[in-house]
Amino acid sequence: MLLFYVFGAAAVIASLLVIAQRNPIYSVLLLIASFGALSGLYILLEAPFVAVIQIIIYAGAIMVLFLFVVMLLNAPREETTEDVPTWAARTSRAGVARFGVALSIALGLELVWALTKHGGESGAFAGGSVASVSAIGRLLFTRYAFPFEVTSVLILIAMVGAVVLARRDPAKEGH
Amino acid sequence: MTPLLIAQVALTLLVFVALLSSAAGLVYAERKVAARLQQRLGPYLVGPRGLLQPLADIVKLMFKEELRPRAADPLLFALAPVISATAAFTAFAVVPFGAGTTLFGWLREPLRLQVADVNVAILVIFAVGSMSVYGIVLAGWSSNSKYSLLGGLRSSAQMISYELSYGLALAGVLVVSNSLRLTDIVNHQGGTWFGFLPRWFVFVQPVGFLIFMTAGIAETNRAPFDFPEAEQELVAGYHTEYSSMNFAMFFLAEYVNMVTVSAVATDLFLGGWHGPFLPESLGWIWFLIKVGAILFFYIWMRWTLPRYRYDQLMRFGWKVLLPLGVVNLLATAAGVLFLGA
Amino acid sequence: MPRLGDYLVLSGLLFVIGAAGVMVRRNLITILLSIEIMLNAVNLSFVAFGRALGSADGQIIVFFVMTVAAAEAAVGLAIVIGLFRHRESLNPDSFTNLKW
């Protein structure tokens, strides 16, 4: 239980800092920390396979991609409200931000209320069998074989698309 | 505080200290072997036969001044070597190096010679290996210098490219051994065929072994894949701006990574701690011998082969090693299916 | 022992944090990061439900969600790179050509 609170608090605090940071590199690193905490939570949920692939795929590959892009673009620190040109634009943007935060807080409170209403009965976990890696593999190749193949095609499309979208236009470069 | 718990904690500390000293020992071994390969003597002044040379190196590094470029990001600059070193040590935590021992009957149940026995040990090694990319890329970025940035980006791109072939070689072993636990994989390799050929996976998966070793050398940024940190190239790549203990931590991380890759290769392909003439409980001696052999091979490669240029390196990783890994996996799967082994 | 409800509350909190990030932040990369937070929150609730119902389906769905998230991050970042090359800015307010 203590571990749940530790990992949960780490995940929440890291995510809050992600959206509060100005420097995008710090945001990416804090998100990696949040993923690590989530991986710990998955282990508590007796899902070691998901925990490890969370680290391998999310923290180890997707975040490296983000980091590379941030470094490639030399992403500037986010501008503060003073940089916005007109007074109208500034207040409207601040208004949208305040509205967004208020909406999120309202959503959050409602979720917490709804999920804790049925207190003890949304109860303890079933003592059911823990899915081993081989069981997951077997399921993936039998019942979920079609989504599996479709996902691989999807990744191929995404790969080709990303390469095409990020390519410099050779005509404009003039070499 | 059962005796088993005390033994486990002591084992963890022992592994930690052993890794540290192995890094120091590797420094010495590298210089001596390099010297002999180049027909010279190597260090021989400090201590008998130069054996205290690493101690002298460490003392020198400790007394050097810790520099930090003014434009460097202080938090990331300090964090990067920590990430590298931590990932290197953590990866070794799931590697078993001996059969269970009861320490001459002191313990009631056998102590596994492994810091943590997890069900998905192979995946954990892979995961922690992906984390070590961050140490390098952050070192390159936070130094705020063009050599560091280029070296860091190149090095991390190399590492993530070769991770794929690394994983495919691992998958080949998985198909043959049917388990993700390293202890099970090693135990699968006990015994012999025809009475003399040990049942090591290197004989079942020779291509897999070659792919694994090649990818492992590229993962640890060692020659011939050490373009991003070679002295003749980008000054010193991602650790250009580091001095003293920070630099020492990067080198510690590199050597411990080498040890981990060798240990994993031994467990996966060379039968771990199984070997003739010794009882099961002294298997760790065989383990050390095999790891030592692979490390010697590492050092030998560095001082024999010329370096790959960066684009050659990337082309090799993607166009040669990756398809080879896929074909190996397919062939292994077909073999297991038809032979039912 | 944490109950299912605890995990769902945590997942809800993370989702809301991600949603707030998407709405409030004016930096394209941080918006993409907030989307990843939301996807992770959903993953957590999938695994929690899978464990509560004793089935492996939760983990399988998570597998697919992660893969789709990877594909989406790749394409999203490629678009961000293209946009940055046009306007030298990562602020979504700069890309207002189609507004009336």
Image (spheres, coloured by chain):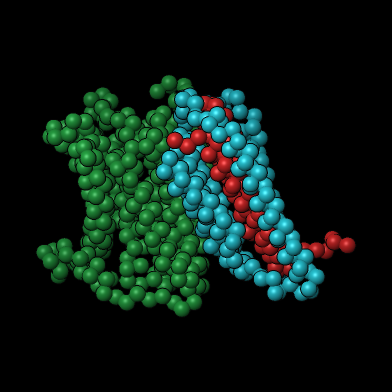
Chain colours: A cyan, B green, C red
Q: Which residue ends up furthest to the bottom in the rendered image?
A: B70
Please state, as top left, top right, bottom left or bottom right, where the N terminus of chain B lies in the image. top left
B119 displayed left or right of C34:
left
- Name the residue: 25% across, 72% down: B60
How far across and how far down the image is residue B72, in percent? 47, 73
- Asked if residue B283 is positioned above or below residue A102 in the image, the reply reads above
Asked if one can make out residue B159 in the rendered structure from this viewpoint, the answer is no
| Residue B78, image quadrant | bottom left
- Name the residue: 28% across, 25% down: B193
Nearest the viewer among B298 and C59 is C59
- Name the residue: 43% across, 21% down: B339
Count up the numbered dots: 0
B53 displayed left or right of B294:
left
| Residue B74, image quadrant | bottom left
- Name the residue: 23% across, 56% down: B21
A113 displayed left or right of C85:
left
- Asked if residue B287 is positioned above or below residue C73 in the image, the reply reads above
Please state, as top left, top right, bottom left or bottom right, where the C terminus of chain B lies in the image. top left
Asked if one can make out residue B139 in the rendered structure from this viewpoint, the answer is yes
Nearest the viewer among B247 and B305 is B247
| Residue A170, image quadrant | bottom right
Q: Which residue ends up furthest to the right in the rendered image?
A: C100
Nearest the viewer among B226 and A40 is A40
How far across and how far down the image is residue C32, in percent? 64, 54
B282 displayed left or right of B340:
left
How far across and how far down the image is residue A157, in percent? 68, 44
